[in-house]
Image (spheres, helix red, strand yellow):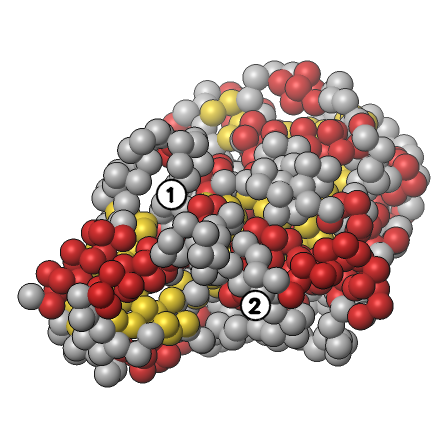
Amino acid sequence: MDRVKIVHEALVRRLAVGDFPGGAAPAGPLEPAMALALYQAQVLSRVLDIQSRAMQKMGQGFYTIGSSGHEGMAAVAQALRPDDIAFLHYRDAAFQIARAQQVGQSGMMRDMLLSFACSAEDPISGGRHKVLGSRPLMIPPQTSTIASHLPKALGAAYSIGLARRRAPEHRCLARDGLAMVSFGDASANHSTAQGAINAAGWTAVQGVPLPLLMVCEDNGIGISTKTPAGWIKASFQHRPGIRYFEADGLDIFDTFAVASEAAHFVRTRRQPAFLHVRMVRLYGHAGADVATSYLPRAEVEADEANDPLLHSARLLTEAQLASAETLSGMYLETLEAVAAEAEKVVKRPHLETAQDVMETLIPPARNCAPTNGPDPQQRLHLFGGDAPQMDAPQPMSRIINWALHDLMLAHPETLVMGEDVGRKGGVYGVTQKLQARFGPDRVIDTLLDEQSILGLAIGTAHNGFIPMPEIQFLAYLHNAEDQLRGEAATLPFFSRGQWTNPMVLRIAGLGYQKGFGGHFHNDNSLAVLRDIPGIVIACPSTGADAARVLRECHRLAREEQRVCVFVEPIALYPMRDLHDTGDGAWMTRYPDPDERIAWDQIGVHGDGTDVAIVTYGNGHYLSRRAQGVLAGEGIRVRVIDLRWLAPLPEEALMAAVQACDHVLVVDECRRTGGQAEALMTLFAERGFGKVARLTAEDSFIATGPAYAATLPSRDSIVAAAKALLA
């Protein structure tokens, strides 16, 4: 027999006769009316699980990972305030229902059924996924099953303390609030969870305010893999900087009491806590999962006998708050009400077209207070001895540094974070003096964990800050890429733009570093970024362009709430000369603070019509060198610097090559998965026939004399242009 039916029939039968499992007597601060309301939330959560499976069998529902066994999270919700941001485990329907009750919000039953049916009227995702979430309830939608939401919860907690001192314009979290994040015992083993929990303790030990409540819902199993008995307690009880609490999730009185104590500790001490809540899992992992296929039947039945609703019913009857008959009636009435509402919900409209689905990929713009840029007097004081040098040509690294100074001066909500960005000023000195001038809470030296760096950025953006995290080298991004793909980029998509996490991610990368690092420090693949829907990717090649493009990325994040990736070519940081040693032709002046390059603008150098070389980054530098050689041979060349890699500035690009006979695409990234693939496709689709490409080889980069052997060079660009003309 179906385990859902078995649990249901056992619940009805045992409620009718008052056959309850044993346990401690009701005790603690839970008020009678509140206890009864929590039972109602638990019942609705359970019945919605039952209905979701019924809808799936009829082809009317599409996702059945439910919350049965985890109904004790309703008591955790009651222990928190409704304005405490909550990043929820996917089994926390009871938490969201209880929070809605707290604020008197009706209609949660219908809202969740709309989500089950993937209706376009689902108030959180608009039919894009079955997710928990609500903007009024301060619950960002969360699809993570591997605890990848823990790093951003840490970031949100950090932002609460920072906003007390430096309130951003779009702050939404309370001064005395906390951030709560919940996850399963199996997910606690994931590297993302371990990194975030370690980062929380690391931060707290240094005395940094971090009001973060981490709730581990321990049902003893992850799909079919059991968690060793005592593993969670042994692993987390003695973590430095983190206070440990444990509660019986089958007992709403105990859970409420312990969760209240933990929340009070976090809120008043502004330190992280780990709340370990023991639970059971009913029905198996999801709708298609048969728990008895990998667990002994006796274990499955033992969990079913410990049904949280039966435990709550016992506690309520012992407290003389309701009779078993009344509690049974509440359950049966809820079954009828949910089934009746489901019949209506399945008839509501669904998403139909690609345009419907993609409508929320791009977040909405928001109103921002007008700004006239950095204050001239403050700027003069800030830059001090650097000011006279701004009128002289400078290399890219120094100009980016000045641009960061101006952005942070003009926009106090701007943050910089990453490994070594503070006291050291970055591996290449790009963030020098920022921490000394703006303070360690705005220029944050993080621990060595890219997932935590990006999570810190996502979480602070939730509270109105504009984070500019730095990944030290492009190859290091792969350790944390899911924070972009699975968290940052998906948030507006799954929330209909109600939740956003704008940022400007700075990454030092690409190749051509002489004698340093090999493939870990010379990574020439952007493929991991290019296919993430909705993000903006920029790659400047000159200092002046870097400043202007960085300012546009910041504007896109601040005003349009976009996730931007700003790739900085390491080899061009110190570049001074172009054609001859000492010519200083690659250096530029620092542009005025109000100058920007819009994300549909390209750079065109030269007016030749024989060949247009389309490129970016180091490829732009090398193509300009090749342009001089080709000119000496009578070949007229224009070099087009893309600057923006996603979305491609297609119309500006096509206009720039229109007068040319041939197009050569020079891509310093690999032949497979590089930008050249998209560019060649674009030219083919637009009917531009005389096109060729020169790319890096499908290889990692070597250290030593062969550092550029697999990459385009000035001479190979010259040869490719001649071959195209021939």
Res. 112 in view: no
Residue labelled with disc 2 = 548
The location of residue 122, given as percent across then percent down, is 56, 68
Q: Amino acid at mark 1?
A: Tyr
Badge 2 marks a residue whose secondary structure is helix
In-front residue for pair 369/635: 635
- Quarter of the picture containing the N terminus is top left
Quarter of the C terminus within the rendering: bottom left
Please tell me the numbered disc located at residue 96: none
Task: Name the kind of residue labelled 2 in the image.
Answer: Arg
Relative to 429, residue 297 above or below: above
Question: x, y (%) of residue 260?
Answer: 86, 39
Q: Secondary structure at mark 1?
A: loop
Front one among 415 and 174: 415
Give coordinates of residue 232: x percent, y percent: 65, 22
Q: Where is residue 518, by image quadrant?
A: top left
Q: What residue sits 66% from the left and 62% below the top? A: 390
Near mark 2 (Cα within 10 A), the count class, few <14, some 14-19 or many ≥20, is: many
Which of the marked residues, 2 or 1, is nearer the chain's N terminus?
Answer: 1
Residue where numbered disc 1 is placed: 512
Residue displayed at 43% across by 65% down: 643
Residue 166 x/y as whole percent: 84, 57
- What residue is at 30 percent from the left and 40 percent from the top? 708
Q: How many marks?
A: 2
Q: Is residue 490 above or below residue 305?
A: below
Seen in the picture, residue 419 relative to 243 is either above or below; the reply is below
How far, Cα to Cα, is label 2 from label 1? 24 Å
Image-quadrant location for residue 420:
top right
> Is residue 619 toward the left or the right of residue 457 in the image?
left
